Image (cartoon, helix red, strand yellow):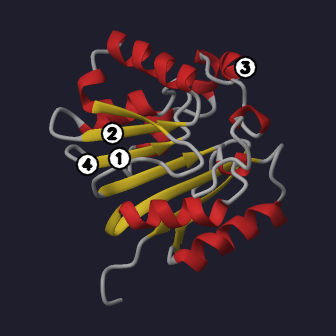
Amino acid sequence: MNITESTTPEAFVCPWWLIHSFDNPLRRLVQDPVRILQDLVHAGDCCLDVGCGYGYFTIPLAQMVGPSGSVVAVDVQSKMLEGMKRRARKKEVLSRIRARQADASGLHVEGVFDFALAFWMLHEVPDQESLLGEIYGVLKSGGQLLLVEPQIHVDSRGFLRTVGLAEKVGFARALEPRIFFSRTLLMSKPPAGA
């Protein structure tokens, strides 16, 4: 997978020091992680948070899956992962989270996941098809991917192009949940033999 075209991910991704501008308590008023994820994630689930940043969704995911579940949080920036781990430790859910640093060769995740989240990050990836294919490969049969992109960065045509790539690797459209200031689609990995 080609997450970046060079060895400097900063050329494509939101810099770690800018995370506080959109990862703050006011955001919960319009993009509450629990409200967004409550019908998609259950106790005992194994979840994948791709582009986790400082853990805005990772920590609520870890709370929702409970002690019998787990979350793998992936980011290309080590400072994002460090910040996420600090915040998870304070919320006492770090034991449910495994942090993985992605690079141009892939996500570096193992296991099979019930649910994957790609929230406001796919537009930063040069090779979206490879990333979507890798996510598809680690989802269990019937697993779901919530794909969310910011309207300010991704127009409707660009989002449809991304959805087309997801369908090309095997995903099927499921629902179109409404999330403030976002283009959103819930996709599923069809059951084996379907």
Q: In this view, which residue lies farthest toward the front?
A: 7
Seen in the image, is 51 located left or right of residue 87? Answer: right
Between residue 15 and residue 88, name the one nearer to us: 15
Tag in front: 2 or 4 = 2
Q: CA distance from mark 3 to mark 2?
A: 24 Å
Do the residues bearing badges 4 and 3 touch, measured as CB atoms within 8 Å?
no
Q: CA distance from mark 4 to mark 1?
A: 6 Å
Do the residues bearing badges 4 and 1 touch, measured as CB atoms within 8 Å?
yes
- To which residue does mark 3 refer? 18
Categorize mark 2 by other alpha carbons within 10 Å: few (<14), some (14-19), many (20+): many
Locate residue 2, reporting x and y percent: 63, 55
Which badge, 2 or 1, comes first in the chain's sequence?
Answer: 1
Q: Is residue 176 visible?
A: no
Could you say which quadrant of the image residue 96 lies in? top left
Query: In the structure shown, which secondary structural element does the residue marked by tag 2 occupy?
Result: strand
Do the residues bearing badges 2 and 1 touch, measured as CB atoms within 8 Å?
yes
